[in-house]
Amino acid sequence: MHSAFAVFLLLLVAANSSGLPVAVIGATGKLGRHAVQKLVQQGCSVRCLVRCAPSSAAKPSNAQNATSAEVAAWLTTLPGVELVEGDVTDRQCVMELLRGCSACLALHGARRTTKLSDLLPWVDATREPAHAKQVNYEGVRHVIEAARASGTCKRIVRVTGKGETPWSIFSILINGLGSMAKAWNYEGERLLRACDDIDYTIVRPGYMGQVDAQLEGASLVLADNGGDLKVSGIPHSSVAQLCVRCLDFPNAARSTLCAMTAPKGQGADSFDPLLAEVAADTRRFAGGELFKRHVLAVRVGGLVMSGFAVGFVGGSVSVLRAALAMLTR
Ligand SMILES: NC(=O)c1ccc[n+]([C@@H]2O[C@H](COP(=O)([O-])OP(=O)(O)OC[C@H]3O[C@@H](n4cnc5c(N)ncnc54)[C@H](OP(=O)(O)O)[C@@H]3O)[C@@H](O)[C@H]2O)c1
């Protein structure tokens, strides 16, 4: 049964018309592994950037709790999938990855959490390779440069998130705890929108929850032109489908798409009919001033939360004191 399925997939790979591989960055992630699987099912060959080589000790697995090494080992079992070991912060690795590719899915994202030492005025945490500036911003710059150098890679699909509302509680928390990940993702978007020689599709999904969750009782909705939609949960597999399918829609080039779910009946069951309707960006997006607003929001949010924490601790101490006084009376 398994070998028959593998032969079927190999036939699809052979039938892939462009013949050029699609590069995937973040392939070991919860989103990336679904995207690779969908590309393979479509008959594409895939070249994945992975940060850890699949050791013989790693058991191939694409389970939600699998380690990156286990997912890398699983990727090697898929037909037409090739691994390139490296990091998106290493320009040369990205150059090698994109050589001869037709498109790149940049599905990576910084995993660094903010450290207390980041607050010290003499520390520049943004230089750390794992910092969101390096991964979500400089990494995107490397992808653009590598796409240009390749001469073959004409489309970059980048997954970011809603990033134009610095004062929302989600933005403050993600930026405050995650090394300004949202703010740097938006800066990466700006690099892409500034390219006039490479097409981009920016995907801003809602909260991607359970990796295997299906679209039960829900449907898919899409807004183009950087439009806003109410935040909702959306399965990784649905977002992966969008990232892969948009490659077949020329009208999705140079577009910023927000992808969410809505109650059944209010959207579509697949992204294809929604993608057929999208158009390239025309609105004026915020410039560098948005980053400053993200920084200000985190500072104010941090102060407010610290104030609440101090008030809460102070209140708790007073209550404890009063209780002790009553007990010892
Ligand atoms: N989860 C959500 O709800 C949500 C919502 C909106 C947007 N997003 C965006 O979508 C992205 C993908 O989501 P996810 O759930 O798949 O995240 P994930 O499971 O944390 O995957 C992140 C991927 O990025 C890779 N990566 C991190 N730093 C890298 C680097 N320096 N070079 C190369 N690869 C690097 C990781 O590699 P390793 O396996 O080696 O660590 C992993 O493959 C997120 O990072 C975020 O930016 C997520």
Image (tube, rainbow, N blue to C red):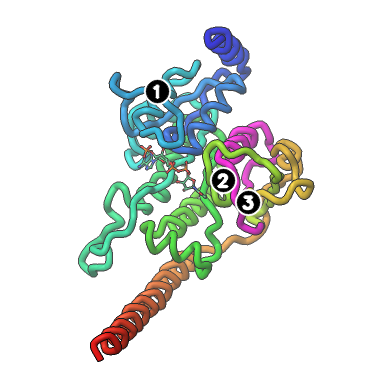
Q: Where is residue 210 in the image (x, y as percent from the top left)?
A: 53, 42
- Residue nearer the viewer, 2 or 109: 2
Q: Is residue 146 visible?
A: no
Q: What residue type is labelled 3?
A: Cys
The numbered disc on residue 196 is 2
Q: Please tell me whether mark 1 or mark 2 is closer to you in this view.
A: 1
Q: In this view, does 123 lie above or below 18?
A: below
Magenta highlight on residue 117: no
Q: Which residue corresponds to the image point at 42% horizontal and 33% vertical from the top-left?
A: 28
First of labels 3, 1 by sequence position: 1
Q: Kindly indicate the quadrant of the structure image that contains residue 276.
A: top right
Tag 3 near tag 2, CB within 8 Å: no
Element type at mark 1: loop
Q: Which residue corresponds to the image point at 42% horizontal and 23% vertical from the top-left?
A: 74
Q: From the image, tell me which residue sits under label 1.
A: 60
Task: Specify whether 57 is left or right of 241.
Answer: left
